[in-house]
Image: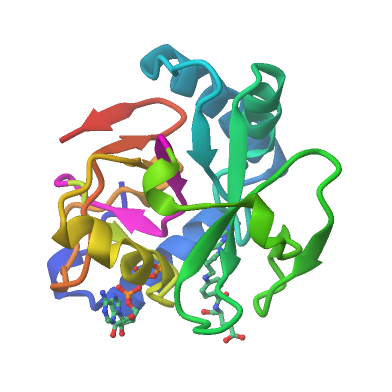
């Protein structure tokens, strides 16, 4: 766990430190983490047939989701990836992703499916949303990349206490901190899966 005096660090300092830590993981560590998260996920989550799962394509040292995505596809579940909303530019849409989906780079050079409205799934029709994060704490609070995309996308979900999707964070173990300084709009996670642990609140 990150050791410095977390409570005295600002959100942006924590973001910088943990982004560095995860970028410094070796290729081998990333590969092993990707395999372990795949095993850990199916050990703890019993999915209904043809489940709909929001995921992400890894960037900036994030936990590599490629093996998990392949497994989900093989098991005939449906994977959806975030697309930055073309009009408001501040929230995310979730679009179906298959092996042959046409992709394009978003403004952060992260690959996302080329917008096709007929392949978009409304948030509340996803069964699970597996979210990227920069840091998480012992209470399930999440710190992201700082764009506020997930928080804004989930604001209504949180306000109206929707039952779906289940919010699950994916992270390396080194992304855990003691306590995050939280903001009013932060949507806490219900579960976090790391290569070695399963947390639930
Ligand atoms: N893999 C992945 N996809 C995702 C997210 C994510 O966290 N991870 N997002 C989660 O929200 C959204 C994109 N959010 C992002 C926000 C900031 C930066 C980023 O790299 N910022 C740079 C400065 C970029 C610039 O302005 O040119 C930086 O802080 O260094 C990247 C993605 C949607 N897709
Ligand atoms: N529900 C919301 N309504 C309005 N503004 C919001 C909301 N959620 C977040 N924001 C704005 O987004 C900005 C970034 O928020 P924050 O630092 O919490 O992002 P993050 O959780 O790290 O990023 P992300 O969710 O993209 O991974 C904040 O400055 C805040 O003003």
Q: Quadrant of residue 148?
A: bottom left
Number of marks in picture: 0
Percent across and percent down for residue 171 are: 44, 44
Residue appearing at x 48%, y 17% in the figure: 42
Q: Quadrant of ligand 1?
A: bottom right
Residue appearing at x 24%, y 78% in the figure: 10
Q: Is residue 18 left or right of residue 119?
A: left
Q: Quadrant of residue 94?
A: bottom right
**Which segment is the magenta one?**
127-139
Work out whether residue 148 or residue 91 is closer to the camera in this orientation and state it.
Answer: 91
Let me know if residue 45 appears in the view: yes
Q: Is residue 75 left or right of residue 178?
A: right
Let me know if residue 170 appears in the view: no
Q: Which residue is situated farthest in the bottom direction here? A: 88
134 drawn magenta: yes
The quadrant of the image that shows the C terminus is top left
116 drawn magenta: no
Residue 65, placed above or below residue 187 = above
Percent across and percent down for residue 169 are: 38, 44
Percent across and percent down for residue 51 are: 50, 26
Residue 56, placed above or below residue 16 = above
């Amino acid at each position: 766990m990150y050791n410095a005096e977390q409570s005295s660090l600002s959100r942006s300092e924590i973001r910088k430190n943990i982004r560095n830590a995860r970028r410094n993981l070796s290729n081998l560590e990333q590969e092993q983490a990707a395999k372990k998260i795949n095993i850990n996920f199916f050990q703890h989550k019993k999915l209904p047939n043809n489940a709909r799962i929001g995921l992400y394509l890894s960037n900036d040292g994030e936990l590599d989701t490629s093996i998990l995505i392949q497994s989900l596809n093989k098991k005939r579940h449906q994977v959806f990836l975030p697309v930055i909303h073309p009009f408001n530019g501040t929230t995310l849409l979730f679009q179906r992703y298959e092996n042959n989906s046409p992709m394009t780079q978003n403004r952060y050079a992260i690959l996302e499916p080329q917008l096709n409205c007929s392949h978009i799934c409304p948030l509340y029709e996803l069964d699970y949303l597996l979210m990227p994060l920069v840091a998480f704490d012992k209470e399930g609070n999440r710190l992201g990349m700082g764009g506020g995309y997930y928080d804004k996308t989930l604001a209504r979900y949180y306000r109206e206490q929707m039952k779906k999707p289940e919010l699950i964070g994916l992270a390396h173990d080194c992304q855990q901190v003691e306590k995050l300084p939280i903001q009013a709009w932060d949507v806490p996670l219900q579960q976090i899966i790391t290569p070695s642990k399963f947390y639930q609140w």
